[in-house]
Image (spheres, helix red, strand yellow):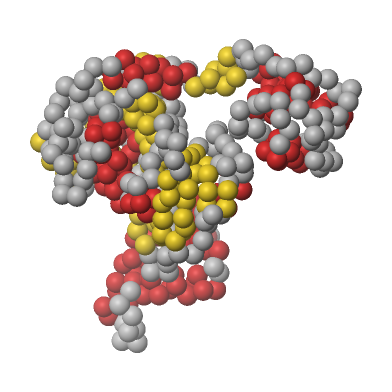
Amino acid sequence: MKHLRTAVFLAAFLCAALRCAPAAEAVTGADRLETLNRLSEIIALHALDSESEWPLGDALAALIDENPALFDKLVAAMYEDLDEYSHYLTREEFERQYPTGQPFVGVGIQVDAARGPGLYIDMVRADGPAAEAGLRAADHIVRIDGVDVSLFPWQAAAELLRGEEGTPVTLGVRRADETEERAFTVVRAALQASNVSYTDLGDGVGYFSISGFGTLEDFASFTATYRRIPYEGIRSVIIDLRDNGGGDTEVMYNMLNAMIPTQGEILFAVEGKNRLPELFTSTGAGQWTPNRVVVLVNEFTASAAEIFAGSLQDLELATLVGARTYGKGRGQYVFNLRDDSVAIVTALRALLPKRMAYDGEGVAPDIPVPGRQCRPYEETFAPLSADAAVLPTARSARVLGVEQRLALLGFFHGTPDETFDDYTRWALGLFQKQHRLTALSYAGVDTLRALLTETERQLERGRPFDAPYEEALELARAAAEKPLVAPLPPLWPGESDN
């Protein structure tokens, strides 16, 4: 009985002890990872049968071979705490999300789609064959390789410009204030798609649109044009960065630096997790100073575009017009990995000269102007009814009414008149096709009814009005009324001021 009582006592004691002892702490994932790392070291250093230098890595590779979905889970876990700009992408995903401009064959002009028939040149690329041949903005191309395109819609005329790289095309051009047609021979060339376009707005104002900072082609196009335009009478500049999502910081820096006439100005800085801030300063490459620089920005101006605009604003070299920018003051490193995939990791923070960090806040414009506005139409139209067709042989006020309404809706880019010609027929065909009407060579009753209905709808909506652009243009024109304050740079060898 004594032994039995002792056994019962010990059992009770052990039960009490177990109840009173603190519970063992749960093993965490971090603990297990440390165990795996240590186990890998032990096997690599001491196991006679192991030839692996990293058993843990080899084990992971074997598990991923057996279960490929495990790889995706591991990547997702590593990226889980990172920001929205960090991504792991396959090569195909990367090229789809971050496309680069592909070369194309052309003559290096941008066509003014609002004017026609024929081709009116809106912009000539400084690095293209058209510029080398002597073509200018506002030139009217009326003949292509002997074909009279003076009555062609611009889309049809532009087709004749296309051809093989290295082949010549002869252009007949009418230049403003000249009665004689000029002939230019241009050799088609491979050109890199550019994010930069330029237009002379008249009255001493030049307009740049920069949709992104992509390659050195963007830098070359911008700087060559920016350097040339003061000799063409430009005294004020508008730079449109609206909807510019950024791009290559080095390209942006070089374009910005080309506008700064003084040396040693801090343009911006970038800092990282384990690096000191890197300063980007001006080198004095800016060759001339406009009377005024106006930069257009909106809520989609982001990243490198914000640095460009914010730096000019902080240095008091530009007036910003529009809406507060997006607020992406972070930069990413792009790493090409062994399997041709791509790791994108946010690693940099951008700092501006005065306001420093702007991430999450954006850059405020000097002159806030809402972007989406409409104005009432003030046009008057010739009378038009749908009670009878308008035929191609007609010459009447009804033809004028048709062309006026097609012009309002964006199908007719010439000057409306009372003559039903090939251009009228072409514009009607576009309208009929878009509205799924029977394609006719004249304006039938159904076409006229649809034309009148769409015109009324457009009149109710009002004319789209780019208020920020108009504000920028007014500021630039006022400043351009005065002569250039700063002297022009000396011409480079081979350049001409004519």
Q: Residue at x 73, y 17 (%)?
A: 382
For residue 180, above or below residue 236: below
Q: Residue furthest left?
A: 264
Q: Position of residue 18 (x, y in %)?
A: 46, 51
Q: Residue furthest front?
A: 180
Q: Is residue 402 left or right of residue 130?
A: right
Q: Position of residue 103 (x, y in %)?
A: 43, 58
For residue 425, above or below residue 461: below
For residue 345, above or below residue 437: below
Q: Which is more toward the observer, 71 or 24?
A: 71
Q: Residue furthest bottom?
A: 49
- Residue 118 in view in this figure: yes
Q: Which is more toward the observer, 472 or 212?
A: 472
For residue 63, above or below residue 319: below
Q: Position of residue 13 (x, y in %)?
A: 45, 51
Q: Residue at x 45, y 43 (%)?
A: 181
Quadrant where the image shows the C terminus: top left
Q: Residue at x 30, y 74 (%)?
A: 42
Q: Residue furthest right?
A: 387
- Residue 302 in view in this figure: no
- Number of numbered callouts drawn: 0
Q: Position of residue 483 (x, y in %)?
A: 21, 20
Q: Which is more toward the observer, 160 or 352?
A: 160
Q: Residue at x 43, y 53 (%)?
A: 107
Q: Is residue 374 left or right of residue 278?
A: right
